[in-house]
């Protein structure tokens, strides 16, 4: 693991905050966060996000204007937007330092990096100034050899059941949000979702079978704490591909606990196919949904690639 130590007080940090994160608790805690930063003599400027893709636009514009030190306060979706804005800015992203004060419903990216649960305590991690040269992935939707859409990710891209739950939660019930709605959608999808034939190709790996769900991972957690890719490391220059084969409903229920503690690779080896790769292609003869941090991607053929060490991100990994 390659870390860089930075004296964070030497720079002006541009803070992107999502006031809607975690049911608006994020902005309500800004007073305490700003007080802690002031006491520790951290220089900063504040930028409010909140709308769809606003975080992308703010981060992109800041980088284009020469900013290289950014803090994002919010959940996994806001983090992902800021990462996309940086990657789309056209600057040398290896010059950019991104710190995260996680405050959302899932905080899956932060779990891999061993951040404290209390957002305020993340300021202590920030003051230590330990940054990791973080790998960044990109997933593209391709139709008839044309790239129709693309999305960068620092955590996990999900396919199949995972994305179907997001579709049921966000797109079919846009006016009802929250953990309870997500859980209801998960249960509803569990009883109606059918595994899909999928062809996965990567260097040295060719897999063709019905898949219940799959992840292409840089970090370990998704779905609000499921450790779906327990061996993933955010700086090893590889993506971990985890495909869970067709399961009957009873087997799904028995596998849930092992998905949360990361033991599914050992407990259900007959149902899990995995590999490491820096490029992956995923195709299906049926509609295969895909998502990145709750953002559904346009369906089609999916091509994933990796930019190793593309961005300096704050970490608490010891």
Image (spheres, rainbow, N blue to C red):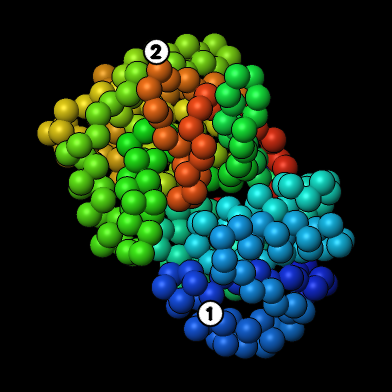
Q: Which residue is mark 1?
A: 27
Q: Nearer the viewer, residue 233 or 71?
A: 71
The relative height of residue 184 versus residue 28 in the rendered view (above or below) is above
Estimate how packed mark 1 is, as few (under 14), some (14 to 19) or many (20 or more) residues with alpha carbons within 10 Å: many
Estimate how packed mark 2 is, as few (under 14), some (14 to 19) or many (20 or more) residues with alpha carbons within 10 Å: few
Residue 209: percent from the left, percent from the top? 34, 15
Tag of residue 208: 2
Give the number of marks.
Answer: 2
Q: Which quarter shows the N terminus?
A: top right
Q: Is residue 276 left or right of residue 284?
A: right
Mark closest to the chain's N terminus, 1 or 2: 1
The relative height of residue 72 versus residue 236 in the rendered view (above or below) is below
The relative height of residue 315 versus residue 202 in the rendered view (above or below) is below
Q: Give me the residue at 66% from left, 81% from top.
A: 37
Q: Give me the residue at 60% from left, 42% from top.
A: 151
Q: Nearer the viewer, residue 191 or 202?
A: 191
Residue 299: percent from the left, percent from the top? 48, 32
Q: Give me the residue at 72% from left, 47% from top.
A: 87
């Amino acid at each position: 693991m390659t870390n860089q130590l930075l004296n964070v007080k030497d720079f002006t940090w541009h803070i992107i905050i999502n006031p809607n994160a975690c049911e608006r608790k994020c902005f309500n805690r800004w007073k305490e966060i700003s007080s802690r930063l002031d006491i520790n003599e951290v220089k900063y400027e504040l930028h409010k996000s909140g709308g769809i893709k606003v975080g992308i636009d703010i981060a992109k514009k800041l980088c284009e204007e020469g900013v290289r030190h950014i803090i994002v306060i919010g959940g996994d979706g806001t983090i992902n937007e800021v990462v996309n804005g940086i990657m789309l800015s056209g600057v040398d992203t290896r010059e950019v330092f991104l710190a995260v004060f996680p405050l959302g419903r899932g905080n899956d990216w932060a779990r891999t990096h061993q951040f404290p649960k209390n957002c305020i305590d993340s300021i202590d991690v920030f003051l230590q100034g330990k940054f990791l040269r973080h790998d960044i992935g990109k997933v593209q939707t391709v139709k008839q050899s044309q790239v129709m859409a693309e999305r960068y990710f620092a955590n996990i891209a999900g396919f199949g059941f995972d994305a179907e739950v997001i579709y049921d939660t966000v797109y079919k019930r846009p006016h009802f949000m929250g953990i309870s709605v997500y859980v209801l959608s998960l249960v509803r999808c569990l009883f109606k979702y059918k595994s899909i034939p999928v062809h996965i190709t990567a260097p040295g790996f060719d897999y063709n079978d019905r898949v219940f769900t799959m992840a292409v991972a840089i970090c370990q957690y998704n779905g609000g704490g499921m450790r779906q890719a327990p061996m993933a490391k955010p700086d090893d220059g590889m993506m971990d591909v985890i495909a869970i084969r067709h399961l009957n409903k009873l087997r799904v229920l028995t596998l849930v606990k092992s998905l949360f503690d990361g033991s599914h690779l050992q407990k259900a080896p007959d149902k899990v196919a995995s590999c490491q790769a820096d490029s992956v292609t995923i195709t299906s003869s049926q509609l295969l949904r895909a998502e990145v941090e709750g953002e559904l991607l346009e369906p089609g053929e999916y091509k994933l690639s990796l930019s190793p060490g593309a961005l300096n991100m704050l970490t608490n990994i010891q």
